[in-house]
Structure formats: C-alpha cells, structure tokens
C-alpha cells in the first residue's frame, strides 16, 4: 500500500505522523543517552530506566508499530539481565546515540522540504480554481445581460411606434452583449479545461509523488531504528557474552521491524474511504440566446461541444469541501472532537468506540474488585472490632458504588453508539428485567433506539406524552404500610443490611409520613425491596431512612445479596 493513492486526502495526518516519527526517534536517542549516564550503576537504576520508558497503558497508539514493539521488547530484555550489566559506554555512545542524532537532523530537513512542496502544489491548485470560478461568474453575468438586450430588441422590433434608429441601436446593443457572452463562454470553457487538467495532475501526479517521498523517508526512519536496535544489541554481545541469550532476543526484536507493516498501519489508521473528485461538468448559460447571424459573431453550434448541467454531477457544498487536499481553512485552529466520535469516518469511529469500551470495562472491573475487597475488610472488622471500625469503610464503599454506576452508564452509552456504527439495533430492554418486575426505568429516560438520550430536557423531566410519574407510579405509602408499622420499623436500633443501591431518576418531596426526600441523581442504599406495593425502602449516606417510589429510581442489586437480581 502506498500513501500517495490510499491517503491522497490525509496531508495533515501524514504531517503529524512524520513529526511523531522524528520525535520517537529522538526519544529513543534520549533513552540511549540516559542509559549511558547510568551504565555504571547497579541493576536497580537500570530497571528504573526501563520502567521510565515503558509504554503508558493509556496510550496504545505507539506500540501498534513494529518499530515501537521492537523497542519495548528491548526494554523487557534489559529488565531481565539488569543484575548482570557491565558497562561499555564509549562504544555504545558512538555507534548508537551519535548516529541517531545525526540521522534525526537529516530527517527534519528532508521532511520540511517535502511538506513545502505539498503546500506549494495546493496553493497553485487554489489559484487555478479562483481563475476558473471568476470566469464562470463573468460568463453568467454576460449571459444575463445578453438576455436583457434580447428582450429589449424584441420589444422595439415589434413596436410599430419605435423609430428605425431605436431598433438599430437595440440591435447593435444585442450584438455587443451576445458577442461579449460568447467570449466569456470561451474563456470559461478554457479555464475549466485548464483547472480540470491541473486538478488531475495534482491528485494523480504531484501529491502521490510528494506522499511517496514522505513514505520513503518514514520507512527509512523505521529501518534506521531497526539498525540502531541491532547495533545496540551487538555492542552488548561483544562485551558481555554471559548475557548473549538476552541479546539474541534484542536482535530478534530488531529483525521484527517491518516498514511495510508500519506503513499499512498508517493507512489503516488514517484512510477515509473517500474517492478523489471527478471533473467539473460544463454549465452552459447561453442556450436561451438567439443569434443575430453576423459573420463576426463567435458562437458554438447547438448540441456540439456543450454539456448540459447534469443534476447528478452538481457539486454540493459538502462535496466542494472534500475537493481540496488541505480542506477549507477552519474557523478555529482545531476541529471539535465529539464525544461519540461522529466527526470521524465510520471505521475510525468504530475502533475508537471499541477502545473506549474496553478501557471503561477494565476500570469497572477494578472498581468491582475494590468493592469486593472493601466488603471483605468490613466483614473482618465486624467480626473483629479490635482491628478497626466497620463504619469507617462505608464512605469508601459508597464512593466505589457511585463510580461503578457511572462506568456502567458510560459503557452502555458507548455500546449504543458502537451498535449504531455496526448497523445493529441496541435495545435497553435486553439489559433490563421484564415488565412484571417493579424495578424499571420510566420511558422518559430512554430513546426510541433503546439508548440514553443526550437531550437535557428528556434527562430532567418526563416526555410530553408521558403522564406525570408522581400520578402514574406513586402509590400512597400509608395504604401499603400502616403508620404504626413505619414507626416500628424506624424505631429499630439495628440498621438493616444493604441489599444494593439505586439512583434517583426524579426528585421526590417525601412529604408523607415514612417517606424519604430525594433529589434527581441522588444515590441511595436499598435496605428493603419492593414487595409489590410500588415502594422501596432506602437509606441515605447520612443514615436517614424511608420509602421512595420504585418507579422513581434505577435499582442495582448486589450480586452477593440474598436472592437479589441485578438491574442495569
């Protein structure tokens, strides 16, 4: 795969990628230099260096390239034999670090030259476009003036009261306007032909050659990195035979550098899938003009050399923006990055969403593990009070539960976007209990496709067609529980165990006896499930307890709770 044909419209991304390549090379050179400075220290310092240059887990773009993977493999080998290191700083500094720095300067100069050529080619194409557009507008104006002269001449020619001089004057004016329109037409046709030719050369000759030069430069950089990796290992081999086995691993990593594979990864990362633009059709504005028949008139025979505007080939504003390699100059320095990545091409959007879902899932698993560990610690404290206060862990458990709820919501939202990209129908009904269970989400929280809506108006109030949830889903707690039962339950000194947690979808005033005041998005602990009367008993973090309408909350029961089912 070549950049010139596959990435014809990705100049800015190639600019960033080549800059990244040079930065990575210099970063590797910096690594070698710092290693020379600590070569005579013991294994601990060498392992600290390896740790410093290991890839960050949150950034998975660099390790995709074979040159990056080889470098990180070398770091792993260094960590294995760190305790046996003997130093030869002088030879390594000459063969690796010095060579990298000299090569880095050459790459910077070559890259600057290629990018300047690309910008000059785009400026020349922009200039050709302006000439063609100006001639087109002039042709349109001249045709309109000729039409007006035609109407004026026909009116005077049919007017019996008009004098001969007036008719001759109108005829002369018509001739001049028609002649001028024909000249504008010829000029427009010539400019259009010239522009289409220059555009073809731009996208099929100039840009592919410039991008090929950039690709060759980047591949040489990748090969150079592989060579320096090999030199790095060979120096070690000659001086420290005892660690030759580890050095063989470094040589293997260096041989794994594949410039073609790296170039293919670049294509896969930045390819948009759009096709290069085609030729502009000729738009004839002079078909409605009648000729005076003068020998000196420059005209084009009917149906010969004239292409009528084809509505299928009309250029929309969106297509016109895709015409240029560099695109129109944005109003702001950087385009806004949308949360759902809808500004990206479909394939790139799918990859970014999948990566985000994987990352969120890992974070969620960490929170679940932390919650389980805290619960176990709390059980230990309850059985052995001398070891600690169980209530001191409650704020941390509550914070962990809140984090889990937020992560689940984010994962669901991103899964909905991913399903949309993949052409699948994502419904939240698959992720919720059946309708006969009382713990369900009001319809106002869900979009027709089954995902959370981003409309703030739908987030904070019921939809217009939905009855007020206070009227539709709010039974009277005094009908389900007698006041005496409330008093007996809340007078109990022993707190009920936590069965799960819930998130408030709506605010509830809690004015009735035994009910609990809550605000939208509050997180409460479930201490008693809904018994079929539409009320769930909950507890705030402050310790206040009471009943809340089941339809007002989104409930998630703990896996280890007795007979509980998790609702998402």
Image (spheres, helix red, strand yellow):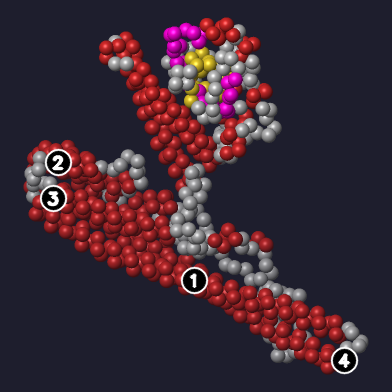
Q: Nearer the viewer, mark 4 or mark 1?
A: 4
Crowd band around label 3 with a 10 angstrom C-alpha radius: few (<14), some (14–19), many (20+): some
Which of the two labelled residues, at mark 3 and mark 1, occupies the earlier sequence position? 3
- Find out whether residue 503 is within the magenta segment: yes
The residue indicated by pointer 4 is 163
The residue indicated by pointer 2 is 45
Boundaries of the magenta span: 489-511
Real-space CA distance between mark 1 and mark 2, rounded to the nearest whole angstrom: 56 Å
Q: Is residue 434 visible?
A: no
Q: Is residue 426 visible?
A: yes
Q: Which sits in the foreground, 382 or 190?
A: 382
Query: Quick check: 336 above or below 77?
Result: below
Which of the two labelled residues, at mark 3 and mark 2, occupies the earlier sequence position? 3
- Residue found 44% across the figure and 8% down from its top: 493
The residue indicated by pointer 1 is 125
The residue indicated by pointer 3 is 36
Query: Quick check: 551 above or below 493?
Result: below
Real-space CA distance between mark 4 and mark 1, rounded to the nearest whole angstrom: 53 Å
Which of the two labelled residues, at mark 2 and mark 4, occupies the earlier sequence position? 2
Real-space CA distance between mark 3 and mark 4, rounded to the nearest whole angstrom: 102 Å
Which of the two labelled residues, at mark 4 and mark 1, occupies the earlier sequence position? 1
Quadrant of the drawing holding the N terminus:
bottom left
- Find out whether residue 484 is within the magenta segment: no
Q: Main secondary structure of the magenta part?
A: loop
SS label for mark 4: loop
- Residue found 29% across the figure and 16% down from its top: 388
Query: Quick check: 432 above or below 108?
Result: above
In the rendering, which numbered label is found on residue 382?
Answer: none
């Amino acid at each position: 795969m070549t950049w010139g044909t596959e990435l014809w419209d990705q100049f800015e991304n190639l600019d960033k990628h080549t800059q990244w390549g040079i930065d990575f090379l210099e970063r590797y050179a910096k690594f070698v230099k710092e290693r020379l400075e600590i070569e005579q220290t013991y294994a601990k310092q060498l392992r600290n260096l390896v740790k410093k240059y290991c890839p960050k887990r949150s950034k998975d773009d660099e390790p995709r390239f074979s040159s990056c993977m080889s470098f990180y493999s070398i770091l792993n080998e260094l960590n294995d034999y760190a305790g046996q290191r003997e130093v030869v700083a002088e030879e390594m500094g000459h063969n690796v670090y010095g060579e990298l720095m000299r090569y880095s300067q050459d790459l910077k100069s070559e890259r600057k030259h290629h990018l300047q050529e690309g910008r000059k080619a785009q400026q020349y194409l922009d200039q050709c476009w302006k000439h063609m557009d100006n001639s087109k507008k002039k042709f349109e104006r001249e045709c309109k003036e000729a039409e007006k002269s035609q109407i004026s001449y026909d009116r005077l020619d049919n007017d019996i009261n008009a004098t001969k001089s007036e008719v001759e004057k109108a005829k002369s004016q018509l001739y001049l306007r028609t002649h001028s329109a024909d000249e504008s037409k010829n000029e427009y046709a010539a400019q259009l032909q010239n522009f289409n030719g220059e555009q073809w050369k731009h996208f099929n000759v100039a840009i592919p050659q410039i991008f090929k030069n950039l690709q060759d430069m980047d591949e040489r950089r990748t090969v150079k990195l592989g060579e320096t990796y090999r030199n790095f290992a060979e120096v070690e081999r000659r001086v420290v035979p005892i660690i030759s086995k580890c050095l063989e691993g470094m040589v293997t990593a260096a041989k794994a550098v594949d410039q073609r594979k790296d170039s293919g990864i670049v294509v896969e990362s930045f390819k948009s899938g759009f096709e290069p633009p085609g030729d502009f059709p000729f738009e004839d504005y002079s078909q409605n003009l009648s000729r005076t028949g003068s020998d000196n008139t420059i005209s084009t025979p009917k149906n010969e050399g004239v292409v009528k505007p084809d509505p299928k080939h009309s250029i929309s504003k969106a297509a016109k923006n895709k015409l240029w390699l560099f695109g129109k100059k944005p109003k702001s320095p950087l385009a806004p990055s949308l949360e759902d990545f809808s500004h990206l091409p479909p394939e790139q959007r799918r990859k970014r969403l999948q990566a985000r879902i994987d990352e969120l899932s890992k974070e969620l698993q960490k929170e679940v593990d932390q919650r389980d560990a805290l619960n176990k610690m709390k059980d230990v404290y309850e059985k052995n009070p001398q070891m600690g206060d169980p209530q001191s862990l409650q704020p941390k458990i509550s914070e962990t539960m809140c984090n889990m709820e937020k992560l689940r919501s984010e994962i669901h939202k991103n899964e909905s976007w991913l399903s949309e990209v993949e052409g699948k129908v994502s419904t939240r009904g698959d992720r919720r209990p059946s309708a006969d269970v009382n713990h369900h989400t009001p319809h106002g929280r869900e979009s027709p496709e089954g995902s959370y809506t981003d409309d703030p108006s739908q987030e904070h109030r019921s939809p217009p067609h939905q009855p007020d949830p206070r009227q539709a889903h709010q039974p009277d707690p005094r009908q389900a529980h007698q006041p005496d039962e409330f008093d007996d339950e809340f007078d109990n000194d022993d707190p009920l165990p936590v069965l799960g947690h819930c998130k408030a979808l709506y605010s509830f005033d809690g004015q009735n006896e035994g009910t609990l005041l809550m605000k939208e998005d509050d997180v409460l602990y479930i201490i008693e499930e809904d018994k079929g009367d539409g009320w769930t008993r909950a507890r705030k973090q402050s310790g206040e307890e009471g009943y809340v309408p089941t339809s007002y909350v989104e409930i998630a029961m703990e896996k280890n709770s007795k007979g509980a089912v998790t609702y998402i």
